Amino acid sequence: MQHFLDTILTITEQAEAIPKRYFRQGVTIDQKQDETPVTIADRATEESIRAGLAEHFPDHAVFGEEYGISDSDSPYQWVIDPIDGTRAFISGMPLYGMLIALLKHGVPQLGVLRMPELGEVYTGTDQGAFLNGEQRLAVSDAQHLQNAFLYINEPDKMIAEVPDVLARLNRAGRDRRYSYDCYPHALVAAGHIDACVDFGLQPYDYLPLVPIIQGAGGIITDWQGNTLDMESDGRIVCAATPALHSDILTLLQ
């Protein structure tokens, strides 16, 4: 696994120069069929990552947000979100990220979360989770929701589709904050916050988070407590401890 990690870190280090070059430069914005925005930076970044994977792992399958699935008989599949947080990117917010997972037989083995504008790289494998390859990450010891610092991701989607859940979340925790995209999950892994509830995600949004959260000692599942896979419904909760996770699942139901 270390070989895979070292290689993808090199590939993504080169690729992150692309969004950094376009950031706050007034790029043209297109709308995809699902009405989400996309830019030349999204496409060029994924192309760069795919080219690196084709060079080093030509037999592996690849699934990316912008260019879909390239199948293979290999048990390995790379999952790519070249710019997680395109709306942040196009509005000049530096909290967009880059997400990569390596699956084996559909199970996440490795996760990488890059924050190009912050100079931070979060990684997770069965050997643990790290920041910038040096600082071992560990979740907080928060046990109860009433004492937890909670981030609520995608609140606009929640208020439109599950307003009752959002209303309960708004009354939960010691403190809470609305947020978007991948960075709040990194904050859980680093122990800065205790939990994050997310909504409306795709596999390339959540699968890279699994090895990072788990490697830091946390829990990440869907809202029913099920293990995340390609077929999950995109409703995600990550928490520092099993007890806190259980509290949040109860609230979500």
Image (cartoon, grey):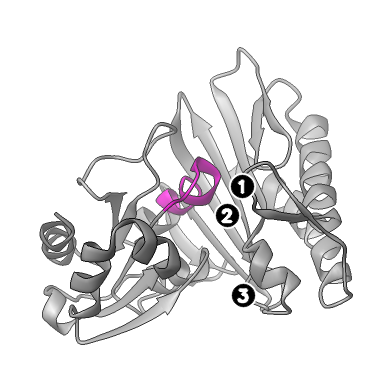
Q: Position of residue 99 (x, y in %)?
A: 60, 53
Residue located 65% across and 16% down the image: 72
202 lies left or right of 119: left
Please state which amino acid type lies under the numbered disc 3. Leu
Q: Nearer the viewer, mark 2 or mark 3?
A: 3
Question: In this view of the protein, which residue sits in the foreground, 188 or 27?
Answer: 27
Residue located 37% across and 37% down the image: 232
Please state which amino acid type lies under the numbered disc 2. Val
Residue located 84% across and 64% down the image: 17
Location of the C terminus by quadrant is bottom left
In reply to whether residue 206 is colored magenta, the answer given is yes
Q: Residues within 10 Å of mark 3 (few under 14, many from 20)?
A: some
Please state which amino acid type lies under the numbered disc 1. Leu
Q: Which residue is mark 1?
A: 5
Q: Position of residue 154 (x, y in %)?
A: 44, 65
Q: Secondary structure at mark 3?
A: loop
Q: Which residue is mark 3?
A: 95
CA gap, disc 1 and disc 3: 23 Å
Q: Secondary structure at mark 2?
A: strand
Q: Position of residue 28 (x, y in %)?
A: 87, 62
Q: Residue furthest bottom?
A: 175
Asked whether residue 218 appears in the rendered view, the answer is no
Q: Residues within 10 Å of mark 2 (few under 14, many from 20)?
A: many
Asked whether residue 146 appears in the rendered view, the answer is yes
What are the residue bounds of the magenta stretch?
200-211
Q: Nearer the viewer, mark 1 or mark 2?
A: 2
Task: Verify CB contact (< 8 Å) between mark 1 and mark 2.
Answer: yes
Q: Which circle marks residue 112 in the picture? A: 2
Q: Residue furthest front?
A: 160
